[in-house]
Amino acid sequence: MRIKTAQVAILVFVMVFGGVACSSALGFWKTVNSKEPIRYSSGEFAGEYNPDDIRGSYTFGEISKLFEMPIEDLGKAFAVKDKSKFEAFQCKELEAMYSASSAEGKEVGTDSVRIFTALYKSLPITLNNDTYFPKPAVSILKSKVILTDEQLKYLESHTVTPPETESAEVSSTNENTDRIVKGNTTFKELLDWGVKKEEIEKIINDKIPNTSEAVKDYATAKGTEFSTLKEPLQEQVDTLK
C-alpha cells in the first residue's frame, strides 16, 4: 500500500508537534530559560530556591526577586557604582570587573554571589576556598546576618578591595561620628580622632602601615584576632571623649 505525500506530511506534523505538546505538558520541553533555580528537595529548607544554582546569566534584579533580597544590598555588596545598573547587572560581569583580583588567585564572580546570597538568607551552602568577596559584601553580611565563627573566619580571610574604591572607603569611615572602633575603622580615622601614633603602635606591636588600611584587615593579614586590637584601641578612643 502506497502512502500519499499529503498523508506523510500530516503524519510527520502530528509526530513532531504532538511530541512537543506532550513534552511540554509533562514539563520536559522548555523553549526558553526560565531563570528559576532549583529548590532544596529535603530538610529544613525544602521547597526554597537553592542559591547554589544561580548562574552567570542571572541579573541582580532577578536574584533580588527570587531570593527576596534588597537589590541595593546586592549592588553595594559587589561595588557596582551606578545604581541605575543594579537591575540589569549580570553575575558573570564580575569576572571582568575583578580581573585584577583574579590575577592574584582571588576569584570574585558568580560563586561569590551564590555564597553571599546563601549567607544573607541563612541558607546552606559549601564555602569555597577559591572564592573571594569585596569588602562591602563582607560588611553587609556582618551587619545584617548572624554568622557562625566558621563563616566569619572564612569571610575575613577571603576579602578583596573593590577596584577604585579606596578613597570612597576612607571617606565612608570618616562618617563614624560615634567614634566606635568597627571592622572598617582605619588607622587614619584613629589618628584623626586624636589617638596618638605611639599608642596605636604599642597596641599593634608594630609600625602603623598604610594609614588608609582598616584595622581589621591589618589584623587578618597578621593572623591576629581583631578583638584583641579592637578593645584596647576603643579604650584609647574613649579616653578622648
Image (tube, rainbow, N blue to C red):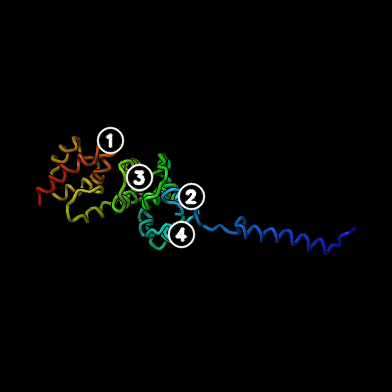
Determine the CA span between mark 1 and mark 4. Answer: 38 Å
Q: From the image, tell me which residue sits under label 1.
A: 223
Q: Say which label, 3 or 4, has the lower sequence index.
A: 4
In the rendered structure, the answer to whether residue 15 lies left or right of residue 36 reads right
Location of residue 195 in the rendering, given as x and y in whole percent from the top left corner: 13, 46
Q: Residue at x 24, y 38 (%)?
A: 225
Q: Which residue is mark 3?
A: 160
Horizontally, residue 166 falls left or right of residue 189, namely right
**Residue, x 17% and y 55% (percent of image)?**
178
Q: Amino acid at mark 3?
A: Val
Q: Looking at the image, tell me whether mark 2 or mark 1 is earlier in sequence order.
A: 2
Q: Please report contact status of discs 2 and 1: CB closer than 8 Å, yes or no.
A: no
Q: Which amino acid type is marked by label 2?
A: Ser
SS class, disc 2 = loop
Mark closer to the observer (1, 4): 4
Which label belongs to residue 62? 4
Image quadrant containing the N terminus: bottom right
Provide residue 70's location: percent of width, then percent of height: 37, 60
Amino acid under disc 4: Glu
- Of badges 4 and 2, the one in the foreground is 2
Q: In what element is the residue under mark 3?
A: strand
Q: Please give the residue where the numbered disc 2 appears in the rendered image.
A: 41
